[in-house]
Image (tube, coloured by chain):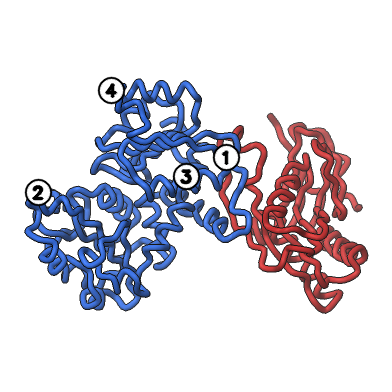
Amino acid sequence: MNLRTRHLLGIAPLESEEIGLILDTAEGFAPIASREIKKVPTLRGKTVVNFFVEPSTRTRSSFEVAEKRLSADSLNFSTTTSSLVKGETLLDTLRNLEAMAPDYIVMRHPEAGAPHFLAKYCRASMVNAGDGAHEHPTQALLDAFTIRQRRGSLTGQRISIIGDILHSRVARSNVHLLTKMGADVTVCGPPTLLPRFAGRFGCRVTHRMDEAVEGADVIMMLRIQLERMTSGFFPTLREYAFLYGLNARRLSRAKADAIVMHPGPINRGIEIMGDVADGNASVILNQVANGVAVRMAVLYLLAGGGDV
Amino acid sequence: MPQHSVRILDPSAIERALTRIAHEILERNKTVRGLALVGIQTRGVPLARRLAEKLRGIEGEAPALGVIDINLYRDDLTRIAEHPVLRRTEIPFELDDAAVVLVDDVLFTGRTVRSALDALMDLGRPRMIQLAVLVDRGHRELPIRADFVGKNVPTAKTERVDVLLAETDGGENEVRVLSPDDETDPREDDSP
């Protein structure tokens, strides 16, 4: 089985079989991290350009580790080092990059749809590492991998995503993926931070945290951006933490073996309390480790992708 | 194009070949201590398991058993359109200084074995590596040879050798050669 396309632009275009293929393949890559020689020669001689127009440390380092463990060569372009600062258009930048014949471009951009636009002109395989508030497919895939790892499967799992859903590409990609794979998804946040028609994506919507965590198998907390406070989305961090922070009391309303997830970086004491983040239910660090295996699987599979 | 399929090993012939290979492995290595069988995914895995059981039957104890998937070490990944499914690699014993017998169903160009050698070397430093195959069909493209062979089957490059095992394919154990012509095949139903 193959992926139908040689790009990974989002979760929305993927079929559940393709998602299953990526997750199954990631299982094969996961053990490499615990070996003496953390490298396989699979993508030897391939070039990957990490084109991060929007800065990132964790996603970019995760991709870099994945690329190096596959023996590929990686090249990093970030906003400051790129010619976009000098006024070069995005398409011209792509064309200049492609003149050096990369095999993959991993791109993060503040505008939704930027990777989709460039993929039309791209000979390389385009991997979306986050486009505006639209999608972050590899994050959703590593989240799903982590859930499967700890809960056995995704089907029928009660999953609550809590926080600033409005501005979150992580939430969007996760809702797409988890509903496609048969999970029961609830999104929760203050009315100011939930998109107006959130229910249209096949998830439940609530503003009440207690309702969201009740009987949940998985609680996924999203980072609250501190800038939102000054833009009027909520009055104070303290009030946000009081109403929507995950503490031990709220966690106890979930299932006994529920897991706590967070894409990182965490704001201790705001959306998640320290004891929960460091507790037994937390799989936050597993998510990071799994991110490398999932990204290795994506790069491996895209090489054999079709031309849809 | 008309194809015809000839069975060249039936279940009892396979059984006898494996028994003989088990005895040969023991003869060469003298002991199962420090010996490990590593099956190459996919069909090398049940073959390795069967050989380990036979060795247990002869010596009273079994050698260590591992499985290895060589797909990440292939030399044709950039050319083949479809990426093969990754399966398990598990070496649950100390590879350093072990005497390893790699086990696979068919030895053909030798590229799979080359990949398996690279994969094993990345996991440790075995003392020595030997190779056991059920069928050697010739047409080597690399300087690789098997130490233990179930049956030598001369084939044309256009033919295909299919090993069907109960564990992986259901049904009877057999080895068939698929040829793209319909001349009578002198290898049909013969004895070793």
Identify which amino acid the numbered label 4 is placed on. Gly
Identify which amino acid the numbered label 2 is placed on. Ser
- What colour is chain A? blue
Which residue is disc 2 drawn over?
A: A231
Q: Using a 10 Å C-alpha cutoff, classify the residue at mark 3 as few (fewer than 14 neighbours), some (14 to 19) or many (20 or more).
A: many
Give the SS element for disc 4.
loop
Which residue is disc 1 drawn over?
A: A43
Whether residue B27 sits left or right of residue B160 in the image: it is right
Distance Cα–Cα, label 3 vs label 4: 27 Å
Subunit of mark 1? A
Pointer 1 and pointer 2 on the same chain: yes
What label does residue A64 carry, if any? 3
Distance Cα–Cα, label 3 vs label 2: 34 Å
Q: Earlier in the sequence, mark 1 or mark 2?
A: 1
Pointer 3 and pointer 2 on the same chain: yes
If the image is split into quadrants, where does the N terminus of chain B sit?
Answer: top right
What label does residue A87 carry, if any? 4
**Disc nearest the viewer among 3 and 4:** 4
Distance Cα–Cα, label 1 vs label 2: 45 Å
**Disc nearest the viewer among 1 and 2:** 2
